[in-house]
Amino acid sequence: MMARTRRASVKPTTTLTFVLLNVLFMAAGAAVVAWTLYPVYESSRYLASAALAIGAAVAIGVLCDRLGWGGGRAAALAAGVYVVGGITLVVPGATSGVDGALQAFIELVRGPVLGWKDIVTLPLPLGEYRATIVPVFALLLTGTLLAVWWALGSARRWALAAVTLGVVEAIAIIIGPAARADALAWAPLGTFLSREFVVGLALFLVMLTWFLWRASYQRGRAISVTRAAGGVHLAKAPRHRLLAEVAAGGAMLIAAICVAVLVAGPLAASTPREVARSAIEPQAHH
């Protein structure tokens, strides 16, 4: 599932607070992705499956980080969650008997490869129809685990965590509804805001906030390492400089929101929504 990452070089710097803050951001980003796909299902089973996928991925990532386990064990744990969670929750009727469990296992094998066609061809919402949640369950479990893995396990390539969630969000958009949601009535100053737009903006803001925090953390770690190594003694940043950095980060967030609402919103409103469902012949529920 994932390549082995060299973790020994960063392990001494990963305090529990560092781990928890990183997984909080990753879980928040994954939750936004899950909410993107809610109109496809509109069911409590989907919400429970998404919560299981994200929660299990976060738990596996933290466990492997704390115990120093590699990618092989993380993949094995994820596969176990996928099978057990798929049979007990994701696939309807899987617990009805041996035949139901066997059929569910078959769906878990074929779902990540062939199940996408059902999602983009069947009429929405899918609800709890057959095993249509399986591909998204696999997507959220794998994507969240990879994001947590990069965030915690790589000192230099941690930004790939945001790239991973961005790719997962793009897939969610592609397999999402073809019809654009109506504009939100509470949009300020007559601007165009839709559900899809708010979801995309939310993920962007979560990742931007994480980037700002992580960059500040990396800078602080570099100063601490330099001092511990007996190198050049760096003076502690004055209070006004720290406040300036916080203000700059806040300004970036505000600017991003303004640009998104005033520029990207109108562009989105005037651009046709093209997704996989737009180009595939729909089929009815059997």
Image (cartoon, helix red, strand yellow):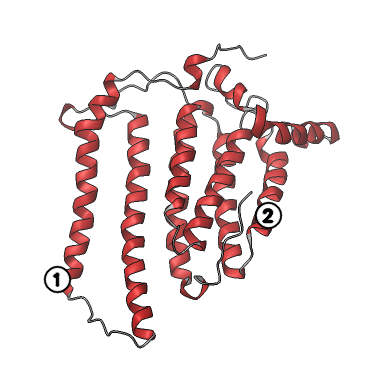
Which residue is pictured at 32% across the width and 50% down the height?
208
Q: Viewer-proximal residue, 139 or 223?
A: 223
Between 208 and 195, the residue placed more toward the observer is 208
In-image side of 191 versus 147 (left or right) = left
Q: Position of residue 245 (x, y in %)?
A: 21, 63
Quarter in which the C terminus is drawn: top right
User: 10 Å neighbourhood of mark 2: few (<14), some, or many (≥20)?
Assistant: some
Mark closest to the chain's N terminus, 1 or 2: 2
For label 2, the residue is: 77
Residue labelled with disc 1:
240
43, 75: nearer the viewer: 75
Q: Position of residue 44 (x, y in %)?
A: 56, 35
C-alpha separation, residue under disc 1 versus residue under disc 2: 47 Å
Residue occupying the far front of the picture? 231
Q: Give the residue displayed 32% in from the left and 77% down from the top.
A: 223
37 with respect to 63 (left or right): left
